[in-house]
Image (cartoon, helix red, strand yellow):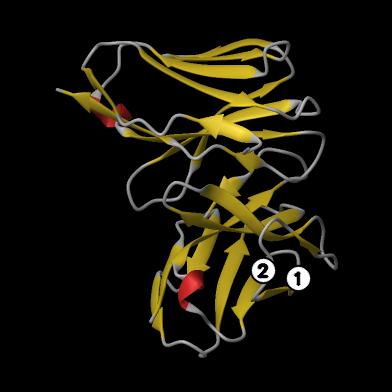
Amino acid sequence: NAGVTQTPKFQVLKTGQSMTLQCAQDMNHNSMYWYRQDPGMGLRLIYYSASEGTTDKGEVPNGYNVSRLNKREFSLRLESAAPSQTSVYFCASSPGGSEQFFGPGTRLTVL
Amino acid sequence: QKEVEQDPGPLSVPEGAIVSLNCTYSNSAFQYFMWYRQYSRKGPELLMYTYSSGNKEDGRFTAQVDKSSKYISLFIRDSQPSDSATYLCAMSPTSYKLSFGAGTTVTVRA
């Protein structure tokens, strides 16, 4: 039982490049989330998916897109990376409510 | 003004001391309250989860919620060096969106 897994662990991009962050959970949870964590800012919600087939914007969605591929997988795409998107990205899942379980994170640097 | 305020610290205590952490919030609709622990370069892990007001105890950890004052606390008794981490409070009204505090960094000195 791996919980929530994320790939890659680290990534360096140049401004304007695109990439997709992958997330998968094996807990049969309905809801999945993408957050970014910046120093002094705490965790901020980018997008979430309350259930398979639905996605909604969070607090900071600009510059990102998401896909809920199936119940297990939820990906985050940066179409044209900007230095302001340098951050640590966390995926989380929840059985459907407020208890959320987090992955190990992806450290992204945009030059 | 942020919806959830948390003193970032840092907080440094000797081993065996009681660690006291707190958050204040402005949204009276919050019903669910959580504390997460995050070790350096790791993902947050759920530590305590409480609904509405009151106290909850789990081993050395006690969470308190005072909705009338919009104030939540986490106490760690008999603190250990392994408790050194960043502690994040989080809260939610009724469903999916959590609002997080910025986190308090705690160091327990051996």
Residue at 67% across, 12% down: B69
Residue at 75% across, 30% down: B27
Q: Which residue is mark 1?
A: A70
Kindly indicate the quadrant of the structure image that contains residue B66. Answer: top right
Q: Are marks 2 and 1 in contact (CB under 8 Å)?
A: yes
Q: Give amino acid for label 1.
A: Asn
Residue A105 image point, x, y percent: 46, 60
Read off the chain for label 1.
A
Residue at 27% across, 30% down: B82
Q: Which residue is mark 2?
A: A73
Residue at 85% across, 65% down: A54
- Confirm whether circles 2 and 1 share one chain: yes
Q: Is residue B30 left or right of residue A88?
A: right
Rounded to the nearest angstrom, the CA distance separating label 2 from label 1 is: 6 Å
On-image quarter of the C terminus of chain A: bottom left
Q: Is residue A83 above or below residue B95?
A: below
Read off the chain for label 2.
A
Residue B59 image point, x, y percent: 45, 14
